[in-house]
Image (spheres, rainbow, N blue to C red):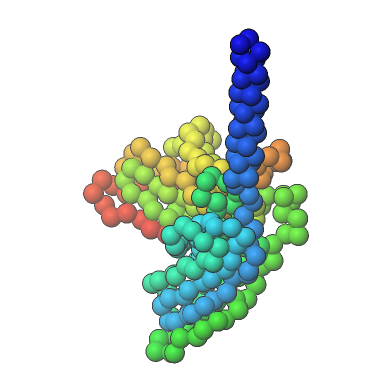
Amino acid sequence: MKMNKISLLIILMATMALSLNVMAQAAQSSAPQAVQITSDPNIETVTSNSATITWGTNQPSGSRVWYGTEKGNLTQQAEAPYGGTSHRVQINNLQPNTTYYFQVESEHGRGGSETESRGIRSFHALPSGAQPVHNQKPEIVEKGLANEENGSVKITGAPILEYVDSNSATIAWSTNLKGSTRVTYGTDPNNLTQLAEAPWGQGGLTHRVKLQNLQPNTTYYFKVETGQAQGTGGAEIESEKVLSFKTPASGAPPIRNEHPH
C-alpha cells in the first residue's frame, strides 16, 4: 500500500509538471509579436472630398491615419475598427483640389508594439466634379531615417494651438521619432513650472497635450518637449523659444488651429 501511494504521488507530480510546461509554452506562443507593415500604403480611391487608404501588416492590428495639409503638422486622424491584417481607412471632409500629407499607423490590440509607415506620403484631393481615381500610389515626400532608432529626435512640425477655450488648451506638434510628450507652462515666461503630458508614444510622431484648469482671459507661456525614443536614454529636445497664447474670456468662442505667438 505504501509503495502504491508513492507511485501515485510520482505520477501526480509528473502530470503537474507536464501541465505547467504546456501552459508556459502556450503563454509564450500567444505573446504579442512586433507589428510590421508588409504592404505599403496605397490610395484605393480619392475624390474631391474623401480618400480611402489601404495597407497590410503581418498580424491583426489597429488602423489609423495621421494627416494634414502641412507635412510637418499631421494633427488630424482617421481610424477604422480593430482587426485583420488588411487595413482600410477612409478620410472624409477633405478640401477639393488640395494636397494632403499622411502617415499610417498600426498598433497591436493587446498593448503590444506599434508601427508607422516610414516617411511621409501625399495625395491630392480632386477638383470638384472630377471623377474618382482608383489605386493611386502615393508620393513619398519625406523619407524616413534608415535607422530611426539610433537617430536624434527633432521637432519637424512647429507647435500649433488646436483648441483653446477659457479654461483649457490643446497643443500639438510633430517630431521625426516617437518619444515623450510634455508641455511646461505658466503665466510668467521665466517661470514655466507647471507640467502637462501625454503617455509615451501616443499619437506616434504627432504629439498632443491638453492643458486644463486655466484662467479665462489670461496669457500663458509655454515650451513643448519631446524625449528621445523610448529606451535609448538619449537627449530631449524642446521648442527653441518660449511661446504664448491667451485664453478667451468666459463665454467667448474657442480658438481653433492657430499658431502661438
Q: Position of residue 204 (x, y in %)?
A: 56, 53
Q: Nearer the viewer, residue 203 or 54?
A: 54
The one nearer the camera, 246 or 78, is 78
Q: Which residue is pictured at 59% across the width and 52% down the height?
A: 114
Q: Is residue 179 above or below residue 195?
A: below
Q: Residue at x 41, y 78 (%)?
A: 49
- Residue 63 drawn at (x, y percent): 50, 60
Residue sticking out furthest to the left = 251
Q: Give the camera-side residue of 199 and 237.
A: 199
Image coordinates of residue 139 in percent, x first then y, are 62, 76
Q: Residue at x 57, y 74 (%)?
A: 42
The picture quadrant where one finds residue 176 is: bottom right
Please provide percent x and percent y for residue 95: 42, 76
Q: From the viewer's side, name the closer residue of 165 and 153.
A: 153
Count the labels in the image: 0
Q: Is residue 63 above or below residue 140?
A: above
Is residue 189 in view from this perspective?
Answer: no
Query: Residue at 43% across / 89% down in the picture?
Result: 130
Q: Is residue 66 left or right of residue 168?
A: right
Determine whether, in the image, residue 194 is placed left or right of residue 215.
right
